[in-house]
Image: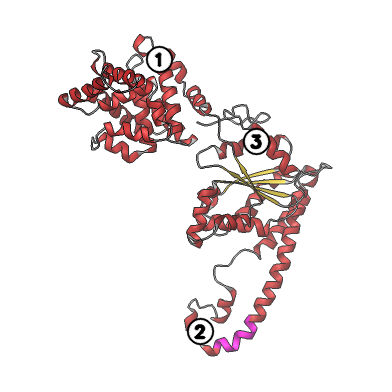
């Protein structure tokens, strides 16, 4: 779902009520009087990028100099410093006030020249000197090492001193550059947003963190990192080993974390139904037997999204698949949304289990027990939609004899002599009634019908 971000009103299409977060963060970053790195932390697929793009526009509308940098799209570079300086270079003409444009370009050119001396070399200088350019240090004789050791030491000391002075000058030029972007008496910092950090190559993610902290740790610049810190921790351990204290490591680079609030339950789902036009589609269906399909789809998706902890991106994927299923179904044909929504969630969240359902390599009655074991699963099964779902599931791959045994078991539970509670009896009788109803369109035919529909839908790319 592509969201239009409007200049002057960037949160007009915000369905997750995150404008308050933008206002709080804006107040916080603009009050910073020292170098600052903030991490906007949220799991992958929970709308971080959309929020950061909306916030970026909000900052621009407040005349706060802002740069947005997608790290994942730029991790092809050999040096993170090149990417960061380059991104500032692209933004200079947009950010600099007309009266400061010439001065801003002077500061940028100075920063670039100083940055060249700070960019990492692919081969250590000392190794080049000692080996006269040869790459295999083992070929250098002991005599050569002894002869050149003194000059190498001096070279390295001089290089260290020069690099340190260059770093100080580089930071100074960056601070001056950032200052040239704002003429207000109450100076606003440059907000540098780095998104998708957790999706980069582990080495590139680490290098970006190090460059931000060591090279860009200057007044007038605030860095905002968009990342799932759990995923970022996995990337760091991939480089430094599983035993590393990643929280302690990240604390060296990140000053504050802001946990992006999860949206209110069902809020995003309702927005998706509106976006895909589901409300209009379901309201156009005239047959009495399919009058309530919208309510069924909305309720079952809502419960299953919470039970299976689907991310916003996974929720969107589910609705996209439902959308194609709808478009390939004649308007007044039954869609069986309760069963269809269940199967869609399995396909998106539990693909291996879904394959077993498709190939009938699992007793489908086990799916009811598996759902009941999940937090919130038993509660769903006790609802009127849960009763229908269980009836579809248990009848889906049963032969005639199995069907008779299954329905008989429910009838026994629902009988007057049963020791089950009144609620359990009513529920069992409802399932038995659904299975034996002449108008019941369940069983293997419905499962095959829906799976075929989903597999056709899966061939379409949204």
Instruction: Read off the magenta span.
Output: 144-152
Q: Is residue 436 magenta?
A: no
Which mark, by number, is residue 21?
Answer: 3
Q: Nearer the viewer, mark 2 or mark 1?
A: 1
In this orientation, which residue lies closer to the viewer: 394 or 277?
A: 394
Q: Are marks 3 and 1 in contact (CB under 8 Å)?
A: no
Q: Residue at x 55, y 54 (%)?
A: 205
Residue 128 horizontal/vertical position (percent) = 56, 77
Relative to 391, 43 lies left or right = right
Answer yes or no: is residue 297 visible.
yes
Asked whether residue 328 is in view, the answer is no
x%, y% of residue 358?
Answer: 27, 34
* Front-most of residues 380 and 31: 380
Looking at the image, tell me whether mark 2 or mark 1 is earlier in sequence order. Answer: 2
User: Residue shown at 73%/67% (left/top)?
Assistant: 165
Image check: 345 left or right of 263? left
Q: Quadrant of residue 282?
A: top left
Locate residue 259, reporting x and y percent. 60, 41
SS under mark 3: helix
Q: Which residue is denoted by mark 1 in the rendering?
A: 292
Q: Earlier in the sequence, mark 3 or mark 1?
A: 3
- Asked which quadrant contains residue 148, the reply is bottom right
Is residue 148 shown in magenta?
A: yes
Horizontally, residue 275 falls left or right of residue 223, namely: left
Inter-mark Cα distance, 3 to 1: 37 Å
SS under mark 1: loop
What label does residue 140 carry, if any?
2
């Amino acid at each position: 779902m592509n969201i239009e971000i409007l200049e002057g009103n960037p949160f007009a299409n915000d369905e997750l009520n995150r404008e308050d977060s933008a206002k709080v963060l804006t107040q916080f970053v603009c009050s910073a009087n020292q170098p600052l790195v903030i991490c906007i932390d949220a799991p992958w697929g929970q709308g971080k990028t959309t929020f950061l793009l909306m916030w970026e526009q909000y900052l621009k509308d407040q005349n706060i100099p802002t740069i947005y940098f997608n790290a994942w799209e730029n991790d092809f570079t050999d040096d993170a410093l090149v990417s960061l300086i380059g991104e500032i270079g692209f933004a200079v003409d947009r950010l600099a006030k007309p009266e400061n444009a010439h001065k801003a370009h002077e500061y940028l050119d100075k920063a670039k020249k100083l940055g060249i001396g700070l960019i990492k070399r692919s081969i250590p200088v000392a190794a080049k000197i000692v080996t006269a350019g040869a790459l295999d240090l083992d070929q250098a004789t002991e005599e050569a090492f002894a002869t050149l050791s003194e000059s190498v030491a001096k070279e390295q000391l001089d290089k260290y001193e020069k690099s340190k002075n260059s770093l100080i000058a580089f930071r100074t030029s960056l601070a001056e550059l950032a200052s040239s972007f704002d003429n207000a008496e109450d100076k606003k910092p440059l907000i540098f947003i780095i998104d998708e950090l957790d999706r980069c190559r582990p080495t590139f993610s680490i290098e970006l963190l190090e460059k931000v902290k060591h090279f860009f740790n200057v007044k007038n610049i605030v860095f905002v990192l968009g990342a799932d810190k759990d995923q970022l921790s996995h990337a760091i351990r991939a480089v430094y080993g599983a035993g590393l204290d990643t929280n302690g490591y990240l604390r060296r680079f990140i000053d504050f974390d802001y946990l992006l609030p999860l949206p209110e339950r069902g809020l995003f789902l309702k927005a998706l139904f509106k976006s895909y036009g589901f409300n209009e589609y379901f309201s156009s269906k005239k047959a009495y037997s399919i009058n309530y399909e919208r309510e069924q789809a909305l309720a079952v998706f809502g419960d299953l999204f919470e039970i299976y902890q689907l991310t916003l991106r996974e929720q969107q994927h589910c609705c996209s698949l439902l959308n194609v299923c709808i478009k390939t179904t004649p308007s007044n044909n039954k869609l069986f949304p309760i069963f269809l929504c269940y199967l869609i969630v399995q396909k998106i969240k539990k693909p291996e289990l879904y394959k077993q359902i498709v190939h009938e390599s699992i007793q489908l009655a086990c799916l009811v027990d598996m759902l009941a074991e999940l937090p919130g699963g038993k509660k769903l099964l006790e609802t009127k939609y849960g009763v229908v779902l269980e009836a579809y599931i248990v009848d889906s791959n049963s032969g005639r004899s199995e069907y008779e045994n299954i329905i008989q078991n429910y009838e026994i539970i629902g009988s007057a002599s049963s020791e089950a509670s009144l609620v359990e009896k009513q529920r069992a009788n409802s399932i038995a009634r659904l299975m034996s109803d002449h108008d019941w369109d369940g069983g293997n035919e419905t499962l095959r019908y829906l799976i075929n529909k989903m597999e056709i839908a899966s061939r379409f790319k949204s």
